[in-house]
Image (cartoon, grey):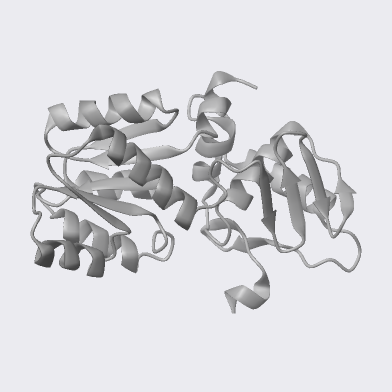
Amino acid sequence: MTAAVRDAMVPQVLVVEDERAIVELVRYNLEREGFRVRAAEDGEHALLMVAEEAPDLVILDWMLPTISGLEVCRRLRRGRDTKALPIIMLTARAHEEDRIRGLEGGADDYVSKPFSPSELVARVRAVLRRTRPAVGADRLQYADIEMELDTWRVRRAGRAVHLGPTEFRLLRHFLEHPRRVFSREQLLDSVWGADISVEPRTVDVHIRRLRKALNAPGDADLIRTVRTAGYALELEVEAA
């Protein structure tokens, strides 16, 4: 496994903050705990970064240039692909009414400045456990598909499924983000690694291989093709 692919499988946090010192403090403490960290200095940049590559969690300052953190939060909650994205508000606005506005605006948690870096890391882990149980788990499951990460074993309805390394990573990514639609470019970044030069159509080849391995006669196809958008792991009955 290349370093780029290994990094792509580590939980990623997007820090949206215009104070560089705070960004570096948060980055240092999260990276020390094994997270990948990206940063945006304003709300508009943050929305673009999320559209390009969705993180596992967003730490979002309220007072931002161009677009406020609260408005960024509301827009993410309205987005089809980002409505379930975990968000922690990190702000100097510590009054109870501000906390209520932040939580009602869609934030999963609210941390006031000044803050303890170790507490923030604990909050990140707690929110991920609550909203994304797959992150950090050693076993993933969706519908009748089960994946054991430590042994690299995959089963569907109790039947062993034999996958190549790329198909395994592709299925793992889908299992960690069920029902979310990913474009070919997003899958290339997350599964192959952003530094790997691969044609987007390569994704289609591996999707076909994954489907062939997963789907025995009579099985529902859980890999949904979304025309002009990409692919998702989703039961059709849920998509209706």
Q: Is residue 112 above or below residue 228?
A: above
Q: Is residue 92 left or right of residue 179?
A: left
Instruction: Give me the residue at 44% from left, 60% from top.
Output: 81
Please state which of residues 210 and 27 is positioned toward the viewer in this rendering: 27
Q: How many marks?
A: 0
Q: Quadrant of the C terminus?
A: bottom right
* Residue 56 can be seen in this image: no
Instruction: Give me the residue at 51% from left, 27% from top.
Output: 7
Q: Residue furthest top?
A: 3
Q: Position of residue 230 (x, y in %)?
A: 56, 55
* Residue 117 can be seen in this image: yes
Please state which of residues 31 and 45 is positioned toward the viewer in this rendering: 31
Q: Is residue 97 left or right of residue 206?
A: left
Q: Position of residue 213 (x, y in %)?
A: 83, 49
Q: Position of residue 23 (x, y in %)?
A: 21, 31
Q: Is residue 238 above or below residue 69?
A: below
For residue 77, what is the image quadrant? Answer: bottom left
Q: Position of residue 26 (x, y in %)?
A: 26, 32
Q: Residue furthest bottom?
A: 240
Q: Is residue 225 left or right of residue 51?
A: right
Instruction: Give me the residue at 37% from left, 26% from top.
Output: 31
Instruction: Give me the residue at 36% from left, 64% from top.
Output: 79
Please state which of residues 234 and 109 is positioned toward the viewer in this rendering: 109
Q: Is residue 43 left or right of residue 65?
A: right
Q: Quadrant of the N terminus?
A: top right
Q: Is residue 153 above or below residue 134?
A: above
